[in-house]
Structures are given as structure tokens and as C-alpha cells.
Image (cartoon, helix red, strand yellow):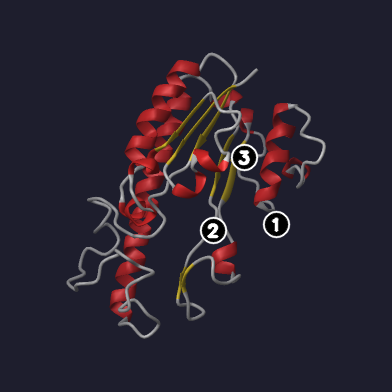
Amino acid sequence: GYSTAGFVSAPYVAAIYGYARGMDEYLDLSAAYEHRSLARKAIVAPDINANALRWLDQHADEPFFLFLHYFDIHYDYVPPAPYDTMFDPDYEGEMDGTDFIERKDVNRNMPARDLEHILALYDGEIRFTDEHVGRVLARIDERGLRDNTLVIVVSDHGDEFFGHGNKGHHRTLYQEVLRVPLIVRLPDGRWAGESVSQQASLVDILPTIMDVAGLDGPPLMEGLSLLEL
């Protein structure tokens, strides 16, 4: 009984991997790029939002499930203006956030000031994406859906910046990679401001959604609903 859509911007959640199953509409913006290295450098949040807000307006009067995946925060760290200078306006060096993993001058022995600038570019991409998530939340409010909509904001991983001598992700299991944001806004503002100290996992998201919606999950569903916490 739900209308379903997904608008994504990373090659790793492309429809060819099965993510479009159950979706009435699924658009993979990264498909326009010949290689994932080009998708990493692209600025995609505005296109994600253009499609998401259009779809949201069309389906606001019916039960819906909407999945949005913003790829901008992923390296390469190339936020658009003014986010490229927002957190480090005084930098005068030559370091930028392109080819973060591949380039040899981004290493554990690099000048501290240049690494500080890369972190500022990373923060700029977070702030840029946060702005676009905020616009989706604003549209939910404008349509009068705030008290009847479950919103979950989550990340898949963090990044290392040589805290343990490494950079990027998918190489180690340190906390800076494993600890991710998980923000849940329940309908009617229930438990607003509360935090869960127990360990939670991405595998718990599906059971939580089903619990909030009052639906039974598939029989072999993994994870636990976080509402109990």
C-alpha cells in the first residue's frame, strides 16, 4: 500500500545490484558517469533534491517510502562555493580534496596545515549535504506531514585521516570508520532529544521502520527494533 521511490548518487547502490526491487521509481544519477572516480568528484545533492521534492509533492497524500542517498560527502572532497572555504577561509596552500585516496602527497607525514585544510573541505561537504537534507525536511513540514512521517538520517561509514596511520575507509575497523550518525525523528515527536547509549547497527534500521509503521517484517529479518531502547 506504499508508493516507493529511491534517488541515489553512488555506483554502489545502482539498480543493477537489486536496490530497485520494490521501487515504483528508482533513479541512479551515478549511471551518467563512465567511472566511479568521476561520480566521486560530482556535485549531486541538488539533482537528488530536485527529483525527491518533485516526487514528494506528487505522493504527499498517500503512504510513501522515500530513499535518498547523497554521495557528496564521500571523497573526493570538492564542495561547491561557499562551502569550499567556509571552514578554512585563510588557507593559502595548494592542497585540495581531489583524488584523496590515490594521490601520494596525502600521507601520514604530510604538513599538518594541509591536512587541516582537507578536513575543512570534508566539513564543507558535510555542511553542503546537511543543507539539502534540511530542504527535504522543510518540504515535509510544508506539506503538513511532520507528525505522520518517520525520518531516519544515517551514514554507511566514516573516514580515517591518519588517526591510526591510515586514510579513507574499507581498510580497517577503527571507531572513526565504524561509528556513524543515526538520527531518528519519530512521528508526533515521540522521545525527541533522547539518545540510545547501547550499541546499535545499520541492521536494526529495517526492524525499527517496520515497528513504527505497525507492520510485520519478513520472517528471517535480522536486527532489533530500536524503539525498545
Q: Nearer the viewer, residue 185 or 108?
A: 108
Query: Could you tell me which residue is drawn at 37 percent across and 80 percent down?
Result: 107
Query: Could you tell me which residue is drawn at 59 percent across and 63 percent down?
Result: 178
Asked if the residues shown at circle 3 and circle 2 are in contact, with their CB atoms under 8 angstroms apart, the answer is no
**x and y percent of residue 18 in the render?**
58, 39
Location of the N terminus by quadrant is: top right
| Number of residues whose C-alpha sits closer than 10 Å to that of mark 1, classed few (under 14), some (14–19) or many (20 or more) | few
Mark 1 or mark 3, earlier in chain: 3
| Number of residues whose C-alpha sits closer than 10 Å to that of mark 3, classed few (under 14), some (14–19) or many (20 or more) | few
**x and y percent of residue 48 in the render?**
39, 36
**Measured Cα–Cα span from mark 3 to mark 2:** 25 Å
Mark 2 or mark 1, earlier in chain: 2
**Measured Cα–Cα span from mark 1 to mark 3:** 15 Å
For label 1, the residue is 197
| Number of residues whose C-alpha sits closer than 10 Å to that of mark 2, classed few (under 14), some (14–19) or many (20 or more) | some
Dot 2 falls on a residue whose secondary structure is: loop
**Above or below: residue 53 compared with residue 182:** above
Total numbered labels placed on residues in the image? 3
* Amino acid on which disc 3 is placed: Ala
The disc label shown at residue 192, or none? 3
* Amino acid on which disc 2 is placed: His
**Above or below: residue 186 compared with residue 182:** above
The disc label shown at residue 157, or none? 2
Would you say 196 lies left or right of 46 here? right
Q: Nearer the viewer, residue 114 or 168?
A: 168
* Amino acid on which disc 1 is placed: Ser
The quadrant holding residue 184 is top right
